[in-house]
Image (cartoon, rainbow, N blue to C red):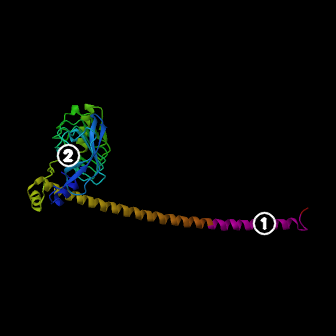
Amino acid sequence: MKFPILFAIFLIFQGIEISNSFTINCDYWIYSLPIIGSVYECYTTNIPTSSGITVTNVTGTHLDGKNNNDVTSVQINGNWILSFVPRNFSNFFPNIKAILIYYTTIETLFGDEFDEFPQLEFLAFYYFNLTTISSKLFEKTPKMVYVDFGYNMIERVGHDLFTPLNVTQLQSVYFHNNRCINRYVQNGNTTAIISLINELREKCPFNDEFPSTTTTTSLTTTTIKNLFCTNESIEDFVCDLKDSMIEVQQNLVTKDEKIEGLENKLLELQAQIQIKDQKIEEIQSESREKFENVESRMQWLEEELLRLTTHPCACK
């Protein structure tokens, strides 16, 4: 099985405690969402640049008469620097049922990113570098009615992604403008949604078994060594990753060779064109000489004819 390169980097280089924390600053407003209607939302763009993923404080001025318990939606604009899904929002907003996240560098959803939101109904996760989605993503959110993964780079979708959900309650599912699929279904068409799910399994196959991420994970050198030495799935992953890197290198070499071949052909064509231009110039020069010679002979004939017709012995 093949896993995204991001996960390899995560395993190999994330040998530090990732319990760093940060504060989210919210702009609060009333927002209208498809299917679930009006929500009281925290909108944020202040994205931390540290490796912390735990929200430990939320700031911002609520609308009159509102407080954290009234917040039912969180919208995050990642500004193309957010590389993880922030955790611990539920400690401040216990009634979240909608999450919108976009413009990030996230490549993989490991499956436990939204476990803290059991009431979640609406997930929009678009305009990403997202390539891989785990089957476990909706295991703790069985009430989903709206799922949007449009405008990503998705190549792999867990075979059982939609298994925990009641397909008949799904109203809209979006997977348009992705690498392996370009399709969406609206208006609660259950038959069409089932067809889309089957198409995902066919065109974006992924039988995922990699471990999930958590906010308390600490991967030391010893932990990584044990994972690689005892877990067959990880060993398979490393081998597949190595094969993928070799394949990429081979493809690059092949592309370089093709480019070099095209450059040589271009030089040959340029040389042929230059030879043809020289021949055309020679033909033009030869034609000019012949024309000048014919013109000179015509002039001589005219002069000779004039001389003969004006000679004293010429016929009258």
Residue 301 within the segment the image draws in magenta:
yes
> What residue is pinned by disc 2?
89
| Residue depicted at 56% across the width and 66% down the height | 279
Numbered range of the magenta stretch: 285-314
Please rate how many residues cluster around mark 2, counting C-alpha atoms within 10 Å: few if below 14, some from 14 to 19, many from 20.
some
- Residue 111, how many percent across, how many down? 18, 46
Q: Sequence order check: which comes first, mark 1 or mark 2?
A: 2
Q: Is residue 163 left or right of residue 29?
A: left
| Residue depicted at 70% across the width and 68% down the height | 293
Residue type at tag 2? Phe
Tag on residue 301?
1
Camera-side residue of 3 and 116: 116
Residue 69's quadrant in the figure? top left
Residue 225's quadrant in the figure? bottom left
Q: Is residue 316 above or below residue 38?
A: below
Quarter of the image with the C terminus in it: bottom right
Q: Is residue 55 left or right of residue 287?
A: left
Please rate how many residues cluster around mark 1, counting C-alpha atoms within 10 Å: few if below 14, some from 14 to 19, many from 20.
few
Residue 310 within the segment the image draws in magenta:
yes
- Residue 80, how many percent across, how many down? 30, 53
Residue type at tag 1? Leu
What secondary structure prevails in the magenta region?
A: helix
- Note whether residue 135 is visible: no
Q: Is residue 238 above or below residue 143?
A: below
- Note whether residue 29 is visible: yes
